[in-house]
Amino acid sequence: MAISERMDDVTDLSLRRYLAGALEPPMQALVEAALRADPVLRARLDGLRLNAAPHDPWRLPPPGAAATLGLGASARAGAVMDAAAADYIELRLSVPEEALTHQVLLLSRAPDGWRVIAPESADEVFTAADLPAEPDGARRVDLSLEGDAPWRFGVVLLPPAVAIPWDAPPPERWSDIQARITLGELRVEAVQFG
């Protein structure tokens, strides 16, 4: 099917997801090709951009997206009798052996965008090797559930060469990491629970 035949697939919802950086690669390519070919579509995108909420600089893939540098993450209720009563989840990560020395950055999705929940200071930095190992080799992180479902969490692994500038204020502290995520240089994954 030619791109021109698929331009009708580019809805305002697709354009909003494009602006948020939340499209799967095939749809991302379709939207970009359609935008290059269609000035009316570009005008629609400009209109949505003007009315959009502030841009979230954390461009994590949507939960369940197949990411080339993903972590095979999954979430399940904490070890309680009734999953509905769980106040935390167990986030399981399939971390490759070569990435065990990487620092772990945990994020939580709030209504206004992603926020870093750990580490909050240089004293709290930990690596994937520091996480408890399950019998199957997966690493586990227990995360508290706050607010109402659904809950979304993100995990980013930072190679030892990527330093977090703890002296910088939060927007600047994370800008290099955010750029590396956008470029696909870091292992990253998002999960949803509830």
Image: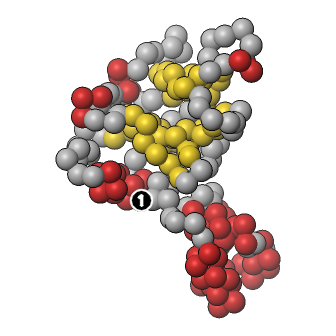
Query: Would residue 2 be seen by someone viewing this image from the given angle?
Result: no
Q: Residue at x 50, y 59 (%)?
A: 56
**Relative image position of residue 17 (x, y in whole percent):** 64, 63
Q: Is residue 116 above or below residue 7?
A: above
Q: Amino acid at mark 1?
A: Leu
* Rendering coords of residue 50 (x, y %): 58, 79
The quadrant the N terminus occupies is bottom right
Look at the image and tell me in which quarter the C terminus lies: top right
* Residue occupying image coordinates x 52% and y 40%: 108
Compared across the picture, whether 82 is left or right of 144 comes to: right
Decide which of 189, 117 is in the foreground and name it: 117
For image coordinates 64% across by 87% down, the residue present is 43
Which residue occupies the extreme bottom position in the image? 39
Snapshot quadrant of residue 178: bottom left
Q: How many other residues sit within 10 Å of disc 1, few (<14), some (14-19) or many (≥20)?
A: few
Q: Residue furthest front?
A: 147
Q: Is residue 5 above or below residue 161?
A: below
Q: Which residue is mark 1?
A: 183
| Residue located at (62% from left, 60% from top) | 23
Could you tell me residue 15's position as x and y percent? 66, 71
Please state if 183 lies on the left or on the right of 70 as rendered.
left
Between 103 and 88, the one lying in front of the other is 88
